[in-house]
Image: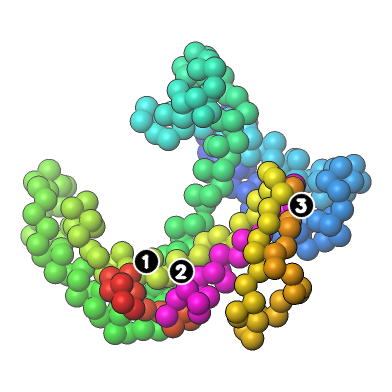
Amino acid sequence: EEKNNPHSILSSYLEAITKIRMIILAQSRSIWFLLPRWLYRLFSPMYREEEKQMKIIRHFARTACLNAQPGSPLHLLRSRKSHNDTLNKNIIDGQEVNKHLLDEAITLLFAGQDTSAATLSWTLHLLSLNPKVQSRLAKEVREAIDHCDDDISDAPIKAESYKTICKKTVMNLPYLDAVIKESMRLYPVAPFVVRKLPEELSIPMNHDNDDDYSSPTNLDEITIPKDTLACIWIYSLHRNKNLWHKPDDFVPERWIDPNL
């Protein structure tokens, strides 16, 4: 009974997520990251712990798929060919879960854990270091709230005793949008992504900036073999001085004024 208790399932899931993050970090810094995956699976005690935690995560994701509310992302994905290519009625009705849907649920649930909290934390940190930006943003928010004309007659607290922010207000806060974008530019939630190349890739070499970046070769292009794991360093791209003016500075105005 405790296994099927929602609070128990959620508690186990949150604990498993914390542990799996530590395992991923430890594995990426160990010799196992450089060895073939089958060796890791056969001989590493880390892999056995990983599978133990993934079993809990899969169970939670499966439960989320089966109990997805109408209109929710997981509910909508049940009837889409991208995640239910045969349009299996049992999957649409929430009686079964296939691998595509399960993998998507794991990704959505995992990605939604700390991304918003991390972005909010960095945004508040940057605002604390830039009082002029903070003042301008506070002024914009106050003015927007004062002009919010949403109907709040059904609110449990009368309008005179508090200020409310409605959807229409949020859509009309350009400086707030710029501040959040600039925060995400400087401190992206995912500082890098890794993708396996489906085919061989040739990249032309640019020797114009050899003073700034040491080139490993004098060739006109380099070729990366198929199935190579390629890392795109988003953090560095967002601070590339060839792409951004004052790349290391917090300048929300760049998202409003195209000339910055």
- Secondary structure beneath label 3: loop
Residue 112 position, x and y percent, is 49, 49
Local secondary structure at mark 1: helix
Is residue 239 shown in magenta? yes
How many angstroms separate mark 2 from mark 1 (CA)?
A: 9 Å
Residue that appears at 25% across and 80% down:
135
Which circle marks residue 45 in the picture?
Answer: none
* Residue highlighted by disc 2: 185
Q: Position of residue 154 (x, y in %)?
A: 12, 43
Which percent across, then down, holds residue 144? 15, 64
> Label 1: which residue?
180
Crowd tier of the residue under label 3, counting other residues whose Cα lies within 10 Å: few below 14, some 14–19, many 20 or above: few
Task: Measure how far apart labels 1 and 3 are at the Cα level.
Answer: 38 Å
**Other residues around mark 1 within 10 Å, as few (<14) / some (14–19) / many (≥20):** some
Compared across the picture, whether 198 is left or right of 96 comes to right
Picture coordinates of residue 159, whole percent (x, y): 10, 56
Q: Nearer the viewer, mark 2 or mark 1?
A: 2
Amino acid type at image mark 1: Ile
In the drawing, what numbered circle is on residue 225? Answer: 3
Which residue is at the front of the view, 99 or 22?
Answer: 99
Residue 212 relative to residue 32: left or right: left
Three-letter residue code for mark 2:
Arg
Compare residues 146 and 4 and report the one nearer the observer.
146
Work out whether 158 lies above or below 126: above
Mark 1 or 3, closer to the camera: 3
Judged from the image, the secondary structure of the residue bearing numbered disc 2 is: helix
Q: Is the residue marked by circle 2 packed among few (<14), some (14-19), or many (20+) residues within 10 Å?
A: many
- The magenta-colored residue range is 227-245
Q: Nearer the viewer, residue 51 or 92?
A: 92
Q: In the rendered image, which quarter is residue 22 located in?
A: bottom right
Cα separation, mark 3 vs mark 2, equals 31 Å
